[in-house]
């Protein structure tokens, strides 16, 4: 675009690349870390096929609902509704709604994994799958939602569009915390 004496538009190709590339590099590193965590537990995971079915869908819950939360917060900032973190109904309502979606999704995933693994002949008791799901999701949602709110407010405060930072970072953080949460749940339940 030509410069006309006015400020350069925010949504230029160079601007988007400059803001997005560092975030994407960090998220790629996080993805590699997630892969290495799973690789380090490969033998124990192979012995628990039901957990292998559970991992992909469960780790997406935090990242996906955290991204939903981040999108809502970003929209609130763009509309001028998101200045005060503590007394902001947009933040409170969005966190509560995202948490409800996260817990309902976790319970639904545990039911579907139980049914699929039972059908395939390597089922685990449903209560074990449910406990793993709930422990992992509690860990995931607390960490991911806290990071979502913090990153959204920090980005906004420093004049960075939260759309450029929150969603990609939170999606990868959800995977990392989700895998960690599953292993913590397996450890707490003496399964691993």
Image: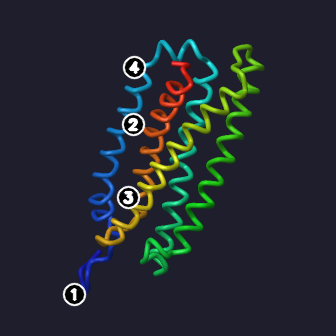
- The secondary structure type at the circle numbered 3 is helix
- The secondary structure type at the circle numbered 2 is helix
Query: Disc 2 versus disc 3: distance between alpha carbons?
Result: 16 Å
- Give neighbour class at mark 2: few <14, some 14-19, many 20+ (Cα, 10 Å): some
Q: Nearer the viewer, mark 2 or mark 4?
A: 4
> Which numbered circle lies on residue 127?
none
Residue 80 at x, y = what percent?
46, 81
Whether tag 1 and tag 2 are in contact, CB under 8 A, the answer is: no
Left/right of residue 57 with respect to residue 170 in the rendered view: right
- Give neighbour class at mark 3: few <14, some 14-19, many 20+ (Cα, 10 Å): many
> Which numbered circle lies on residue 40?
4
Disc on the earlier residue, 2 or 3: 2
Query: Disc 1 versus disc 4: distance between alpha carbons?
Result: 56 Å
Residue at the spot 69% in from the left edge and 40% down from the top edge: 107
As drawn, the residue found furthest toward the bottom would be 5
Task: Tell me the residue that label 1 is attached to.
Answer: 5
Left/right of residue 47 with respect to residue 86 in the rendered view: right
Query: Disc 2 versus disc 4: distance between alpha carbons?
Result: 14 Å
Disc on the earlier residue, 4 or 3: 4
- The secondary structure type at the circle numbered 1 is loop
Left/right of residue 16 with respect to residue 184 in the rendered view: left
> Which numbered circle lies on residue 165?
3
Relative height, residue 3 to residue 45 (above, below): below
Q: Nearer the viewer, mark 3 or mark 1?
A: 3
Q: Nearer the viewer, mark 1 or mark 2?
A: 2
Relative height, residue 98 to residue 50 (above, below): below
């Amino acid at each position: 675009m030509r410069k006309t004496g006015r400020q350069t538009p925010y949504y230029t190709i160079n601007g988007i690349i400059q803001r997005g590339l560092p975030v994407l590099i960090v998220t790629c590193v996080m993805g590699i870390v997630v892969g290495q965590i799973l690789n380090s537990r490969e033998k124990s995971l192979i012995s628990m096929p039901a957990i292998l079915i559970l991992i992909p869908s469960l780790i997406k819950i935090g990242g996906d609902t955290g991204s939903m939360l981040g999108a809502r917060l970003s929209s609130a900032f763009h509309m001028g509704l998101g200045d005060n973190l503590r007394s902001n109904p947009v933040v409170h309502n969005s966190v509560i709604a995202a948490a409800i979606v996260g817990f309902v999704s976790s319970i639904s995933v545990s039911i579907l994994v139980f049914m699929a693994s039972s059908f395939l002949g390597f089922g685990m008791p449903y209560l074990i799958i449910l406990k793993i799901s709930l422990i992992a999701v509690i860990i995931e949602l607390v960490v991911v939602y806290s990071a979502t709110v913090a990153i959204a407010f920090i980005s906004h405060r420093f004049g960075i569009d939260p759309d450029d930072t929150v969603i990609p970072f939170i999606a990868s953080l959800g995977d990392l915390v989700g895998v960690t949460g599953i292993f913590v749940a397996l450890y707490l339940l003496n399964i691993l």
